[in-house]
Image: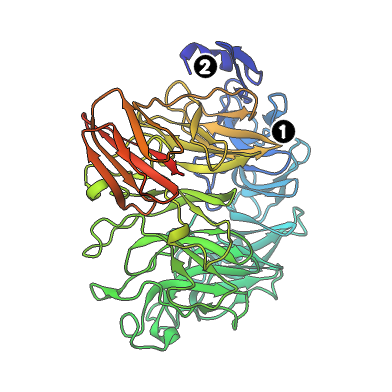
């Protein structure tokens, strides 16, 4: 977008205008002088996050006059406003840990009289109040990790007792478990246990709600850190079982479980935890039976909380068990989950697991694709798949480091970096989600933004209507908003801010897309399918015809050094040097990738369909 066009948007705020004959519908809905303070990449563990329901968006923003306060939007410029100036004047109440339960937004806010306490808002000034002064007076209870639990919220906070008799370290005050329904009488401490406040690998939150219960990591002198369960009452809040019963010489009797990536999948929770010989009862595994951080499942009971029985990352490295590095959990339904992990052979790659099926080594759970096979088998290179959401029309999109994959001769000077990939999960069957069904979308002119030797870091996938929106960085190191109209069409840039827009917090509200732009800290609205401008990405070649029967032709602005045709598994099936055509008549019908290397070193790839 040219600078003058961007200025028009700033001036005309939430109106649709015509610029150079194109109907533009991307516009800021925050007033001038307002800067959104909700953070990029905000997760359930993040202290400054943007949240939304079917009718509202709550976020934090600051102005010179009011400081950092709670804001709300109904998706219109007129309906985007500060909820309440909780601390009158320029200081602000610094709202944190925003959490939506129905139409109520719970959050922590700081005032001079009460310190940092739990607040609730219905989006109006009169309906925004402090729930309870948990730590009476100017002392702060400092609520953290506020998360939904039915019609209530769970959180950790400090009162005078938790400060005076901490569980873990007698020299450090602690926050213990609370529940709240938004009223003072309904805000009660239910657990005399803290949780781990730092050292989290997960972005998925501290609680996993499974049916009418929630599980979370907690501490006790008997079991150190282990998995706890609560039904929302003090009587129903307790440690489930000792996950790591290996003896400990410190403050607790046993070792910590070191729980990470706690995630609800239907009525069960999955997580990774330290798994030792006292649990495996098999000295032949790992290092004398210790297998390191592995996969566990819990239904909230002692009998139903167990290691899955599969050493997913077998073996040892330097005398220590190989860690599975189970992470980035994405539930696909109430029993099937996508995640990334090290299988001990190919390093960290995409994996899938079905909680309703027996756990069998190599069958369930299983790794489904070696995206980064460089150096295999002498060395293992991870692709670190991440940032996946969905599915979108049966596909889960994500970014992964596909270094040296789908390249002729696996050349080191040609790699995809952290680029856009997808996996076909339409079968929703762990047995069918495998290498054959896996579709790598690495292709610089197709589903990879930018060029080889470049990372597009595609992320924040959000479906609005029939379209999939996401944020990606192109070859000019410019991070902007992109879109796909379907799984069968190429992505295109839909809006290009002056400067590096770097959108984040993508939200679907009433069929429109909303996001925050880092470049100016404003909340934007985009109405899909209404003439929004496509920002074309230039390409220096044309591959035709497509579909093709026999000969593939390449039209290029520079001389062609090499043409290669590859299958989706990365195998080179045909190759020719210094020509502009290649014969594919012998190939079976299906989808292939044509990779063209030009004389100046530029490499461009394109999908073709062989009839």
Give yes or no for contact between labels 1 and 2 (Cβ–Cβ under 8 Å). Answer: no
Looking at the rendered structure, the number of numbered marks drawn on it comes to: 2
Q: Label 1, secondary structure: give it.
A: loop
The residue carrying mark 2 is 6
**Is 601 situated left or right of 299 in this image?**
left
Pointer 2 local density, CA inside 10 Å: few below 14, some 14–19, many at least 20: some
**Is 79 situated left or right of 594 in this image?**
right
The quadrant in which residue 548 appears is: top left
At a point 72% along the width and 33% down the height, the residue shown is 74
Question: Looking at the picture, how far across and down is residue 193, in whole percent?
Answer: 57, 69
At a point 44% along the width and 60% down the height, the residue shown is 436
Question: Looking at the picture, how far across and down is residue 171, in whole percent?
Answer: 45, 65
The residue carrying mark 1 is 74
Q: Label 2, secondary structure: give it.
A: helix
Question: Looking at the picture, how far across and down is residue 117, in whole percent?
Answer: 63, 50
Q: Can see residue 174?
A: no
Question: Looking at the picture, how far across and down is residue 197, in whole percent?
Answer: 49, 59
Q: CA distance from mark 1 to mark 2?
A: 23 Å
* Residue 208 against residue 517 in the figure, above or below: below
Q: Nearer the viewer, mark 1 or mark 2?
A: 2
Q: Can see residue 196?
A: yes
Q: Upstream in the sequence, badge 1 or badge 2?
A: 2
In front here: 441 or 507?
A: 441
In front here: 514 or 453?
A: 453
The quadrant in which residue 199 appears is: bottom left
**Is 596 situated left or right of 389 in this image?**
left
């Amino acid at each position: 977008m040219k600078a003058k066009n961007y200025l028009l948007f700033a001036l005309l705020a939430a109106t649709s205008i015509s610029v150079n004959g194109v109907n533009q519908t991307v516009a800021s809905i925050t007033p001038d002088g307002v800067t959104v303070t909700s953070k990029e990449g905000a997760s359930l563990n993040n202290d400054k996050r943007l949240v939304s329901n079917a009718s509202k968006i709550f976020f934090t923003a600051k102005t010179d006059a009011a400081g950092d306060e709670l804001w709300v939007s109904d998706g219109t410029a007129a309906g985007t406003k500060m909820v309440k100036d909780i601390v009158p004047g320029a200081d602000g109440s610094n709202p944190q840990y925003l959490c939506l339960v129905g139409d109520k937004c719970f959050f922590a806010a700081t005032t001079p009289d009460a310190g940092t306490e739990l607040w609730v808002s219905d989006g109006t000034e009169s309906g925004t109040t402090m729930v309870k002064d948990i730590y009476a007076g100017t002392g702060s209870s400092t609520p953290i990790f506020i998360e939904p639990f039915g019609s209530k919220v769970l959180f950790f906070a400090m009162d005078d007792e938790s400060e005076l008799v901490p569980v873990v370290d007698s020299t450090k005050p602690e926050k213990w478990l609370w529940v709240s329904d938004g009223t003072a009488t309904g805000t009660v401490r239910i657990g005399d246990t803290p949780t781990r406040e730092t050292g989290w690998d997960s972005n998925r939150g501290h609680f996993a709600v499974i049916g009418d219960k929630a599980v979370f990591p907690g501490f006790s002198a008997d079991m150190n850190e282990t998995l706890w369960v609560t039904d929302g009452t003090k009587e129903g809040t307790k440690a489930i079982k000792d996950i790591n019963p290996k003896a400990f010489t410190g403050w607790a009797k046993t070792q910590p479980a070191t729980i990470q990536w706690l995630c609800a999948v239907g009525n069960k929770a999955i997580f990774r935890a330290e798994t030792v010989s006292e649990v495996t009862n098999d000295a032949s595994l790992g290092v004398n039976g210790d297998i390191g951080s592995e996969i566990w499942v819990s239904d909230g009971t002692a009998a139903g909380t167990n290691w899955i029985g599969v050493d997913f990352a077998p073996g040892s490295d330097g005398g220590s068990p190989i860690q599975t590095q189970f992470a980035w959990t994405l539930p696909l339904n109430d029993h099937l989950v996508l995640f990334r992990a090290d299988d001990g052979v190919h390093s960290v790659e995409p994996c899938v697991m079905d909680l309703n099926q027996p756990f069998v080594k190599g069958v369930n759970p299983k790794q489904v694709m070696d995206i980064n096979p460089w150096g295999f088998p002498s060395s293992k290179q991870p692709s670190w798949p991440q940032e996946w959401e969905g599915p979108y029309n049966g596909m889960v999109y994500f970014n992964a480091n596909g270094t040296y994959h789908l390249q002729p001769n696996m050349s080191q000077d040609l790699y995809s970096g952290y680029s856009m990939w997808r996996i076909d999960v339409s079968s929703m069957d762990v047995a069918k989600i495998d290498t054959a069904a896996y579709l790598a979308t690495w292709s610089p002119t197709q589903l990879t933004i930018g060029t080889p030797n470049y990372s597009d870091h595609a992320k924040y996938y959000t479906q609005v209507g029939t379209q999939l929106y996401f944020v990606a960085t192109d070859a000019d190191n410019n991070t902007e908003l992109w879109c796909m109209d379907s799984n069968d069409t190429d992505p295109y840039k839909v809006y290009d801010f002056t400067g590096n827009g770097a959108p984040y917090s993508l939200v679907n509200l009433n069929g429109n897309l909303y996001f925050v732009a880092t470049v100016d800290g404003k909340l934007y609205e985009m109405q899909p399918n209404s003439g929004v401008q496509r920002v074309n990405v230039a390409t220096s070649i044309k591959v035709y015809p497509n579909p093709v029967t026999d000969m593939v032709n390449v039209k290029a602005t520079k001389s062609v050094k090499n043409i290669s045709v590859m299958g989706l598994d990365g195998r080179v099936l045909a190759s020719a040097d210094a020509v502009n055509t290649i014969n594919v008549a012998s190939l079976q019908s299906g989808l292939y990738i044509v990779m063209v290397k030009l004389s100046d070193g530029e490499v461009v790839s394109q999908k073709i369909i062989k009839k």
